[in-house]
Each structure stands twice: as structure tokens, then as C-alpha cells.
Image (spheres, rainbow, N blue to C red):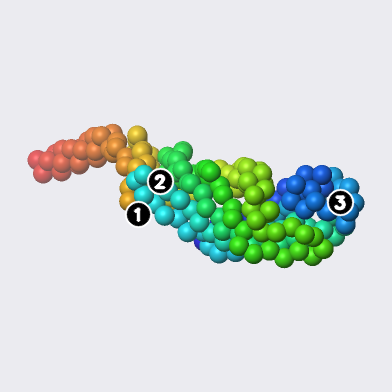
């Protein structure tokens, strides 16, 4: 998660119409006019914390939600600070690559700052916030879908099969079945040949 956070892979953005934003801020179009591509972005402020258990794995973090000015995306129209909670489902793909999927993402605003005059309250925002979590969840999942490879040397990787992932309290366990019979047979044959050569030389 440090890597995801430091490389801004948990940052996501998409665009919505001003008509949609009126569900949050009833006077948005009165201030900015009718717009078709208002940018919303979400960025983690703290490194996400993962709590692994055998029943459920959760991720928590503090995030900023930014509604950007449609005339200048360098300027905020509204800045929301929120607590993020979500379930995290691990999956093992392509041998030793761990992937994850965010599920049931929820946001709760703890403070906000408006850069235009509006009567919106924190309670109003939190009541409507569920409508933006779905797109952000999908965007984050696209970012982390490729997964992260575990540092398993290739010689060992090629001799392991039926790799499985288990989730326990506070840790993940990866289990594989060794497939070393071919290598052992080859090594035994090499040793046998050398012994025979040594015996021949001694005669």
C-alpha cells in the first residue's frame, strides 16, 4: 500500500455533468453555468491501512475528494476530506502475483471547504455521497488489477504447482506443491554416470 500511495495509484478521477452535481449543490449551475465535464478526483492523504483477518479484510484511509472548477481545473470548486473504508478481496493469479479487488467502498466526509457560496451542509453531502463511490471503486480496481509479483526465483517458480492463497488472522499464506521429481531424477542420473566413470578409470 505504501507503493500504491507513493506512486498515486490510488488516485482516481472522472467527469460528470453539472446537472448531476446539483444533487450535491443545488446552486452549482447558478454559479458555474451548465457544464458537461466537471472533474471529480479522489486521492489518498494517508497510507491505506489493511487489517487482514480470516473472516474479512478491510482497508481504511483518509482521502480528499475534489470537485474542480470547470473553467480552471487547477482551482477547486469544493474540497471534501473524508474517511474511506472498504473490503479487500485478495486473489492469486499467474503463479505468484497477488491481485486485489476493492468491494463495498464507503466514504464519510469529516470536513469540507467550499470555494463558492452554497447552503450545502455536511449532512447533505454525506447523504448523497454514495452515488460517487461506485465509479471511484471501479477506477481504483482497474489500477490494481495487474497485481504485484512476489519475489520468487524463477528456478523455484517453475517447480511449483497448485499454488493457493489462504487468508488468516493478520497474515496471508501461500502454499504450493513442489514438482521436483524431474530434477531429482536428472541429478541422480548425472551422479550415477559419474560414479560409473570413476569405476571405469580405477580398473
The structure residue drawn at horizontal position 15% and vertical position 41%, both measured from the top left corner, is 195
Q: Quadrant of residue 110?
A: bottom right
Coordinates of residue 57 in the picture (x, y in percent): 42, 48
- Whether tag 2 and tag 1 are in contact, CB under 8 A, the answer is no
Which residue does the numbered mark 1 point to in the structure image? 170
Residue depicted at x 64% and y 64%:
111
Cα separation between marks 1 and 3: 48 Å
Viewed as shown, does residue 122 lie left or right of 57? right
Q: Does the CB distance between marks 3 and 2 fall below 8 Å?
A: no
- The label shown at residue 56 is 2
The residue closer to the viewer here, 65 or 120, is 120
Q: Residue at x 46, y 43 (%)?
A: 89
Which secondary structure, mark 3?
helix
Q: Residue at x 71, y 62 (%)?
A: 79
Camera-side residue: 75 or 117?
A: 117
Quickly name the residue at label 3. Answer: 29
Of badges 3 and 2, nearer the viewer stands 3
Amino acid at each position: 500500500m505504501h507503493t500504491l500511495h507513493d506512486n498515486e495509484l490510488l488516485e482516481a478521477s472522472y467527469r460528470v455533468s453539472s446537472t448531476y452535481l446539483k444533487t450535491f449543490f443545488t446552486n452549482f449551475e447558478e454559479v458555474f453555468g451548465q457544464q458537461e465535464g466537471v472533474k471529480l478526483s479522489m486521492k489518498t492523504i494517508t497510507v491505506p491501512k489493511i487489517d487482514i483477518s480470516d473472516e474479512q479484510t478491510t482497508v481504511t484511509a483518509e482521502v480528499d475528494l475534489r470537485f474542480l472548477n470547470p473553467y480552471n481545473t487547477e482551482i477547486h470548486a469544493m474540497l471534501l476530506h473524508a474517511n474511506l473504508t472498504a473490503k479487500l478481496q485478495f486473489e492469486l493469479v499467474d503463479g505468484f502475483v497477488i491481485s486485489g479487488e476493492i468491494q463495498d467502498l464507503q466514504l464519510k466526509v469529516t470536513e469540507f471547504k467550499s470555494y463558492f457560496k452554497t447552503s450545502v451542509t455536511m449532512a447533505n453531502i454525506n447523504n448523497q455521497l454514495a452515488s460517487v463511490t461506485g465509479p471511484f471503486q471501479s477506477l481504483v480496481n482497474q489500477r490494481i488489477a495487474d497485481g504485484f509479483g512476489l519475489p520468487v526465483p524463477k528456478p523455484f517458480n517453475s517447480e511449483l504447482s497448485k499454488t493457493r492463497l489462504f487468508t488468516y488472522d493478520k497474515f496471508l499464506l501461500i502454499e504450493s506443491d513442489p514438482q521436483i521429481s524431474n530434477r531429482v531424477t536428472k541429478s541422480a542420473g548425472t551422479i550415477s554416470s559419474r560414479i560409473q566413470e570413476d569405476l571405469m578409470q580405477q580398473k
